[in-house]
Each structure stands twice: as C-alpha cells, then as structure tokens.
Amino acid sequence: MNMQHLPRSLSFAACTAALLALASARAAAQDARPIAFTNARLLTMAGEPIEGGTLVVRNGKIEAIGKDAVVPAGARVIDCTDMTIMPGLVSAVSSAGLTQPPSRRTQPTQQRGRRSMPMPMPGGGGGAQDKAATRVVDGIYAKQPVFGDLLRAGVTTLALTPPGSAFPGLGAILNPDGKSLDELTEQAEGFVQIGMSIDAQTKKLLKGNFDAAAKVLEARKKPPEPKPEEKKPEEAKPEAKKEEPKPEEKKGETPPQPQPTPTPDPKPEPKPEPKQDPKPAQPQQPAAQRRPEPPKNPNIEVLADLLEGKRRAMLEISSAAEMLHWQQVFETTPKFQRTLVVQSYNTQQGTIDEVLEQAKSFECAVLLPPTLSTTPRSRMLTHPAKALHDAGIEIGFLLGSNDATVKQTFFRLMELVRTGLPSDVALRGVTLVPAKALGVQERTGSLEVGKDADLLVFHGDPLTPSSELHAVWRRGQKVPEKP
Amino acid sequence: MARFLPSPQRFAWLVAGAGTFVPAQEANADAAAPAATHAHFAARLLPGEGAPIDDAVLIERGGKIVAVGPRRSTPVPADAIRHEHGSLWLSPGFVDLHHHVSGGGGDINDMTMPLNAEMRTLDVVKPSDDAIRRTAAGGITTTLFIPGSGTNIGGFGVLLKMRWGQPLEKLVMRELGAMKVAQGFNPERRSGDLGLTRMGSSEMLTQLLERGRDYAAKWREFDAGRGEKPELRPELEQLRKVFDKKVPVLIHTAGARDCIATARMFQDVFDVNMVLSHGCFDGWVAAAALAKRGTPVNLGPRMYEFDRYGRFVGTCQTYWDVGCHDMSINTDAPVVAAEELPLQAAMAVRLGLPYEPALRAVTIQPARQIGVADRVGSLEAGKDADFLVVRGDPLDPRNPPLEVYIEGTLVHRNGDVR
Amino acid sequence: MRMPSIVSFALLATVLLADLPAQRGRRGQRPPQQPEQAAPAPEAKKEESKKPKAYLAVVGADVYLGTGQRMTGATVLVADDKIESVGQNLELPEGTTVIDAKGKIVSPGFICVLGNGMGAPRSAPFADGVNPFDPEIKQGLAAGITAFMAGSPGGGSSPSGSNAVIKLAYGDVKGMVLEENTVVAMNVPLSLADREKLEQAVKQAREYIEAVDNFPKTKAADPNAKEPPMPRGGETMVAILRGEKKLWINLSGGGFNPFGGRRTGAASDLPAIREALEISKLLGQGVVLQKPTSAWLAPDEIAATGSMVVISPRDRLPADPKDPDRTGSNIASTALLAAAGVPVAVTCPGGMFGGTGVGTGGILGQDLNTPHVDAAFAVRGGLDNRKALRTLTLDAARILGVDARIGSLEAGKDADILILDGDPLHYATFVETAIVNGKVVYEKAKEPLFRHISR
C-alpha cells in the first residue's frame, strides 16, 4: 500500500502548505498548539462511551483520550460540557461529484424493476462493465461544492464508487477538504468495485474475469523461469513474435519485475504499475521482458492483485435474488478482501435478510441503506439491518451522495435504533465499519490514540432528535461553517 | 379403448344444437289465454329469498309463477304439463344492473356534451345481437343496458329481458330503466370542455339536477291541482321521472372519496332512488359510511383491492362485513363477459362473501334496487317465471344452465349457444 | 426416450384403463389389509446416494394423481425433490417430515402452458434472468401454479421460439428453470413457397438423422468417413423430429371483441387447422394446435394425427350467420377433443381484461390468479370434472414436452404438490400448501395474500 499511502502524505503536505499559505498566522499558530476537548461525552467506537472525558489533539492526531487524560500545558482547551464527540463519518459508497449522471444510481431501478414492474428486466446486461483497472477518480472534477457540503455535514472520509455492474473500475478514497484533484485524491485506487446484476452479461464477465485472474495469479506464484518457451511451445510461439518490439517500446521504463510488489514503506516511486494507468500509452505492454506471456490485461491484473490480497473490493449485491445468482456463478466465492454493499432494498427481488446464511458465508461486513424495508408489495416493515446484526454479521450504513442524505442519516439511524438495533452498532456502522471497508481504519473511524482527529462535536447525543452537529474537525482542523 | 370413445348421446346435443340459429320455440308466448299450466319438479329449488326447498315444484301459468313449494305439500293442478327435472336444481334467473352489450356494440356514449339526460339506450337495443343470446345462455334473464361512463350523465338505460331474437317490445321491461351518472375518473378524461375536474362536474351535475327537481315539483303541483301548467321542457321530461321516483339513478362511482360524494349528492341533497355502482378500488373504505345511509351498492366488476398490506381484500366481503347489505354484483359487460355474472358472484364468495348474500346479489337484490322486485329476482308466486334449470350450485362455472326460462318460455337449452 | 405422442397416448390410455379398477376402488372403501396396493413404494426405491435423503410425506389426503385418477386417504412420499411413491399405507422412512392432510385434497401443481411474470424474465437467457424472490411467485403458488411456460412459443413461417418452462421454486435460482426451448412454434397458413421450404427442411433433417443413425455402420465400412454435417439451420427441425421439441402451430384464436358483435368476418379456421394437421403428417408426429377456434369440428382428424390442443374454453367467437354450423367457437371444444382422445391444455381468455399473468388490478376469474376457473369452464362445456384437472396437469405437461418431469404425482417425477382445501376445480378452493421441488414454498396461513379469508 505504499503507493496509496504516498498521495495521502503528499496531499496532506500540500494541504498543510496551502493552509499555511492561505490562512492567517493565527490559524497556523493554532495548528501547532495542542487542543484539549474536556468534559465531553466521548463515543470512541472502540469501547464503552467515556463520560466527562478529555480528548487531546496534537498535529492533527489524537494524542490522548480518556477520563483522566492530562491536558498538556499550553493547550487550547475547549470545554465540551453537554456535548458528545464521535469520530467523523466515513462514507464508503458514494457517487458524489461524478460528472456524468451516475448510471448506477438510476440503473438499479431500471434494471431490476420498479415497484410497478414486478419482473426483472431481460438479461441484456446494459450496465455490465469490463474495466476493472479504470480509475473513477480520473473522471472527476474537483472544484465542486458537494465535497465541502459533505464535509460540513460530517463526512471526513469519502469514497467514490464507479458506476455499473460487473467490473466498473477502481474506486477512490477522497479527502472532502481537497480543493484540487491532487488534494482531493487520497487514494486513487482505494478499492476494486464489483457489481452484481441479474443478467447474463454480468454473470459471464464475473466468471470469466475471475477465472482469468486466478490463472494469472497461478502464473505469478510460479517461480520465475528464465526459459518457459521450452515448457509450452504452442503458447510461446505466437507470443515470441510479439515479444520483439517490446524492448524498444519499453525504453526508459522501470526495470522489469515479475510483478509489482507494493511494500509498506512509502518510497517515492512515481509509477510502479504502469498497467494501472487509466490511459497508458501501451496498456497491453506491461513490464515483462523476459517472459513471453500474452499481453497483460490490466483489468485482469487488477483482479489478480485482489486475489493476491493486495487490493480490497466493494462487492455490490443488493438483493437476495442477486445473491443467489452470484452463488450460481461462483459455487465458492473466490477469497479476497471485501465488503458487501446493498445499495437499496429491493423487495421485488427479496431483501438481503432473506438470504442470511449466504450473506454470512462471505465473512465480511455488509453496508446497508440506513432504513427499514417492507415485505414485498406492502407496507409491513422489516428490519434487515437488525436481522443481519442478530445473525452475527457486521453491518455498516450508506450515507448517500450529498449532504441532505447525510443529514437524514442520523434520523434514520434513530428509527433503526428505536426498532431494535443497538445504538453503538448504528454509530459504528457510519464510522468504524465503513472505515474498515475502505481499509482506513488505522487512521480514522474511531477515537483512539494515534488516529487522525476526525471529530464530530454534537450538542447532546447524536441519536436524539434534539441533538445538533456543532462542529466538524478534520485532522485536528476545525472545518469552517461556511465555505 | 371403447371406454374412451365419446358417448354419442352425451355429445350429440353439443354439436347438433350448436348451429340452430332459430330461437328456442316460444310456444306459449303468443298463445292467447287461457295459457297452459306447467309444473317443474326438481330436486332443489333456490327461491332467491329464504331457505332452499328440497324436492320442490314450481307451477307456472301464463308466464307467471302460480306456486312454489315442496312437492309433498304443494297442490299441482291436474291439467298441468309436468316437467320432471330429476336431480337438477331450479334457480331464479340472474339480474345484472351494469351491462353495456345489448346494443350491438359500442354505441353507448355521446361524447360531445357532458350531460345527456335526454338520451336513452332504448333506441340502440339490438334484439338480434349475439350478446343477448349469450347473456341468456349464462342464466342472466334481466339486464339493465346502460350508457357508458364517458360523460357525467350518459343517458337512461333500458331494463331488458334477455329474449334474444324477439321483437323489441318483448324484451323491454321498462323503457327508462335507470339514469346513468358517472362520477370521477372516466368522465374526467374527455367529457367536453366543461366539468373536467370533479368540482366542475359536480357543479354542473348539481345545476341540472336542481332544474330537474324544480321542474318535477312544478308538474306535481300542477297535477295536484295547484299552480299553473308548467311549460313543457322535453329535455327535462326524462329527468322528471327520476324526481318522481319512477326511475332510479345508477351512479358509476369508484374510490372512497367519490363514493361518499355520490351518497351525499344522491341521498342527502337530492331525494331520489339511487344505486351506487362499482364501489371499487378503495371504495370499501367508505363502506361503513354507506352502510349508515343504507346506500344500495352494485359492486364489480373489480372484485378485490390489492391493499397496502399485500392482501387480496374482497370488495363485496368488506362491504358486507360493515353492514352494507343492500348489495348486488355486476359484470360491467364487456369488462367481464355478460354471461359470467354468476362467476362474479362466485369470485366474491372465493374472497370471503358468504354464499347466501352472493346468490342474492345476482338475483333478488338487484331487482329490488332497480325497483322490479315485484316481477323478477326470486321464485315466488305472482312473479315472472324467469328461472334456470341447473345441475347444482348455479354460481359454479362448471354448472351451465341446462334450460333457461323467461316468463315461462324456454329461451335457451344448453348447447343452443356454443 | 420420448415416443411419438400418439403411441404414448395409447400406452397411457391402456395403463389408465388397466389401473383404473385397481387403484381407484370405491372412495374411502379400501380395506387396509391389502399390502400389495402399497407395494409400489418399496419397489420404486432406488439406490441410496451417499447423502441421506430428506423425506417429506403428505399423508391422508384424497390424492388426484393428475392422470385422471384419484386415490383416497393416500400418502405422497417425497425424497429430496422427487416423488418417491404414492399409495395407501406407505411405510415412511425414519425422520420423514409428515404433513397431515386428512380431509384435504392433494393435486399435482398446476401447469400453465402460457404465462409471464412470476419471476421469469421476459426473454432469454432465462436461467440468468430469473428472480426467485419475485413476490408474484407467491401469488402464482397461491393460485396453484407450480410451472408455466415463459417467453414466446414462437411464430412465423418456420419453427422458431425462445421460451422456458419456469417452475415457481421460490428462493431457488437453479430450481426455477426446468428446461429451455422445449417448444417452437410457427404460423399457418403458409404460402406455397414457405410450404416448400418446410418440406425441404423436413426432408433434410430426416436425411441427416438417418445418416447419423447409420454412422456407426458407415464408419465401420469406411474408417475415413466423416460424421454427417448438420443441415444449415436445421437444428430446430432435427430436434422436432427427434421429439426433443414440441412444435406448436398458432391459429388465429377466438378473439373477444369487448363490445360484442362486429366480428362476423372471422369465419372458420378449419382450413388452417387442416393445414396444421398436414404439417403434422409431414412430420409423422403430432403437433400442438394453439387456440384452434374450430377444433370442435374436427376432433377425430386431430386425434388421428396424435396432435394436441391449447385452448381457452371461454374465448368467444360468434358464428357467421351465413354458415352457422361450421363457424364460431364452442365451449364444448375441450370436451369434444378430450372425448376424441386429444390432450388439451386450457389457458386464460384473451380479452382485454384477461391475461396470462397474475395481476393485482381487481378483476378476478379472468387471469392466472384462478387457472382452475378455466378448467372449470371446460367442465361447463361437458368435460368430465376429473379429466378436466388434466388440462392443468399432465396434458399441459405433455404439451410443453416436459411430462417426464412434471404433471402428475408418480414415482420419479418432480415433487410439485398442492394441498387444497376442497375440490381442485371448485371456485372457492384455496391452495393451503404448495410444494415445489420437494420444498414447501407457499403456505396460505403464512402469506398475507389470502390468510384473512377463512372457510
């Protein structure tokens, strides 16, 4: 994850620089001073709530937290009596700022049948995509008010989800405070988006690409052989010809490696994986000089990375019917880091709680709409979130793609809590669980020492109707109330 | 294999009777009095009103029922022609108050003006139309052939006996059967340019009804020897009969809001005889309010509402349960085929309406609502001898009427109509 | 495997005749001390697979087998998704789940030869598009439907079509598609040119089949012999001739003019029926006539070809007054055809308010919410009540070419079973429990649809 880490540190540096340059000296001085939030009710998401606790922030990180945490000398003290502090919201699925109309938003209703349309649409596969290596972030315009709106509504970490079924691309993790694409992009390749849909084309793509990726992975695992031509003459022959132009084209590229090996240390290495570039000059010519293998398909390579454990996936399976079709495609789902996403409750195809056992078999968290559902064609309410939680599945919630839906989320969570979901589960579902889904739980998602100071300060308990979001802090910086 | 071959006798009638386009012989219809007496013996007789009579006899003379009762205790005139129906049942002929197909097709709405109180379907009845024949074949002996719901007032429907192929006057039971009013939905679609909203159509309707009411009142005064002779207004003459309570109003209404609006207008504001027809969709929500007013309802062709809890809520059963007992059932032919009126009642039973009221809802109850219970709707002495011979439950689609009599005359034998 | 329908019909008739006196007996009068009656069960037992079978028994009901026969107080034993045996006093394996159905009626699930919705996609590929959680599936099951044909039977001047027999296996993707493309259809009348093409296609397909059949011999004589090539575009015809697909022939059908009358032009489709029968003779096997209005005029001709019929007993077409004896529809069609030995399947009326799906619009008795009403109208036309059930069960399965799998309660067939609270064809009868592929998929008491209605 070195390379993913890199832009973040860069952007953080840029962010700080920008702040330094733009903001007043006072603001800069403030940044250096530690900040202590005292007498607060702290919903840490990592344990029991702390009543009358102190939270110390220095250099954008949480330095100390607890009932007895010491306020450092010279700290700016913010008295939080009657206030509740919780981690900033993590929106793990969104289409915020996508320039084209987000087809995935409209597609589910069209493709999977509206209420008035009781049957699934024919398997035409209109939404099926085969572009797992395409980065959604490359299609975004950074200067849009939606990001700031989301931040002010409490979203301190934002994902950008590529639209479509099958393999619509690589989702990004965004810093909603960013003013330019660079600042905005925290991880350009945050996760692999995979979408299920009941149509033949999607199913075919899923099966075919995962099978291909498994083969690629097998090849990767083999010890590098200097002369594989001898082993597979039939295969090698046609490829041998293709091999010829390669060295010339590849001039000046990074030295050949059997495969990109991302290491945890953030060494500045501009482009270790040219194949993941969305518009590479030679997308079909990855660095592999000595090995006469077919030109690498970047879309398959991404999946191979996924299977190898180098990437994580958001796996959108929104209905019970889609779940069963998924299982028809894969008798055993390939192993990879994943989070299940239910975009909306589709009672026409069965809600996810109808297939609890199958959902459980994925052994991962499930992100759900923060709503109750109904039995089909009726207003009899059902509680899929509670059903999944009771079945021992970790659940999180979707926050939508604009500030209005985020603001509604707390009211929706209140309804879920009123109807039986434990409140800590509800709140973890918008913080820690989605943070894990995006793989940023080391940095945010809970109030723990060493994590970023992404904080929401509420008057009162966030899950009471009278509570009010008083302030949003991101990495130790208070977010201005007005843009 | 022999057992698989059709028994010739069994199917002979199906084929042989099929093509005969001659109406069943109306042997007695034109015969001068004194008419012959006929005694029909059957295993069971459903009077339409009261408990079934087992081992019963129905005695008919001159088209009228002379007596009905158990075979043991009912004296049969010695000269009576005896018809032994064995194990079969006798049932009253069915009555359908919402029927559009006796006119040869289509000619049921004049779509220029929204109010057409001066029109009538009497002028478009086509006695030779196959629809009439089929309707009779289904055991429906009386229908109210009404205009459609395209305009607020479609005109006046004619009350007919389903005597296919006979001269018009032999079919017509009452020239002005009922005035057809339509509320909500349908007339809003393109009923002229006035009254395109429910407010507008209500207002226009009210204005006309007020004129009709006042006109009728003036004539009543004059007839009672008070006041001057009113000016004759031909366009209000038919409407006058409504306010003289000689002709009821049948109002196409669906949905709870319109049901209440209809009851208010035709029961609370204007004092006329009325039947609320359809009452579908969520009309059942208003059923309790209608029950309080004793509103006569004529339900169908929709038999259920698929409600917000995913249930098939039987329309008839819901009305019945809250006390709306003045209930009849219709086909709105051609929405449901005219001959399938008993199936409509059967479907009401399927969805929870008790059997007795379902049978009454296609026999005596509609006859009462339209004001002809003294003639049709049940098998009682003094009434028209309109009855069916069936194998069993007349609502079961498996039991076709084997014989259909209208006023004592055989109008259909099973197989006459394919 | 499949025999020509005429042969199979004859066989079936023989079997039926043979079985009738033995199995039916007098209702409820069978003395319990007749072990040989229960014998079929143990005999039918097949070799146990490794996985222990899940047994389910529906016990004590009057069982309509779907073949036209009925057994009183019998047990239907299901092993996994198949029927293990049907009989009186069956010995139940240990651990059998027992459903007490005393006083109830048990029938095979109804099969609708024409349908849509209920979890089926509108077009191929069906297996990849089924929605096993479609709420309409429950509605179909409540109506007694356990299988139907989705998609289009086909049409045009040569056999075509894209369809599938869908089972209402709620919550089971794999269980929902029984078989795809068991039916192809074409229209009559044909132009002379199309007729010629058809004859050509049949001839080529015949030659191909013969060549394939003889291939082992040819190969023995000449080791270099090539396998005979499939004639271009001839797969469908070859499949028809091999009995792998049922050929339907569309006739005009008895349309229903909502306002009556004005439909005197349509005289008779007897010439078209005869043309269809010509095609049947050309193929040397029966075809399926879809909505032949005038079929009642020629039941014996149809029977002689081994053909079958799909009809709506309620589709009405008035006779032409100029030729009343030979035109128009006939409610007795089903009865007359059945009496001649022609298998018939019923379908819904084709009017503007009927339809081959389950609706929620309020009109009842005209669509697939009540398929039994259509069979009831066949009875109205003179068909025997018990035989009428076959129009929704075994005969419907044969018309779809899937009678080896569904359509009757016989050992080895799919366990698609209804438990009813009355006579299957009575208007007020409800499905209490529906079993598809051996699984209980609908219970009236547990679904909102009709739970509130009690008898």
Image (cartoon, grey):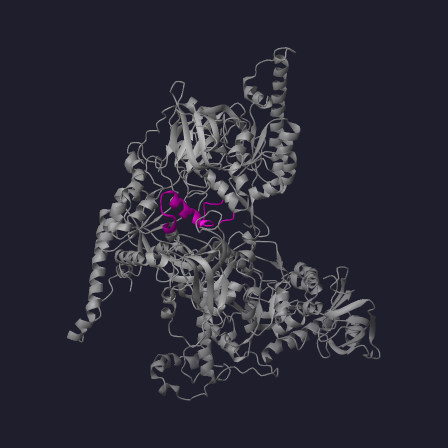
In the rendered image, the vertical position of residue B259 relative to residue C193, given as above or below: above
Please say whether residue A450 is visible from this viewpoint.
yes
Question: How far across and how far down the image is residue B94, in percent?
Answer: 47, 34
State the image coordinates of residue C407 (x, y, percent, origin top left): 38, 58
Q: Is residue A173 left or right of residue C83?
A: right
C101 versus A171 height, above or below: above
- Residue B365 located left or right of residue A284: right
* Spot occupied by residue A242 in the image (x, y as percentages of width and height): 38, 78
What residue is shown at x 61% (from left), y 13% (from top)?
B223
Q: Is residue C367 magenta?
A: yes
Q: Nearer the viewer, residue A475 or C150?
A: C150
Most foreground residue, B27 or B246:
B27
Residue that protrudes farthest toward the front in the picture: B72
Which residue is found at the position 46% from the left and 78% from the top? A214
> Could you say which quadrant of the image residue C241 lies in?
bottom left
Based on the picture, tell me whether residue A371 belongs to the magenta stretch: no
Residue B73, percent across and down? Answer: 48, 31
Q: Return the residue found at the far left.
A: C221
Nearer to me, B198 or C336: C336
Q: Is residue B135 visible?
A: no
On screen, residue A310 versus residue C342, left or right, reads: right
Segment tinted magenta in the rendering: C359-387
Displayed quadrant of residue B354: top right
Quadrant location, the C terminus of chain B: top left
Asked if C8 appears above or below C323 in the picture, the reply is below
User: What number of labels is visible?
Assistant: 0
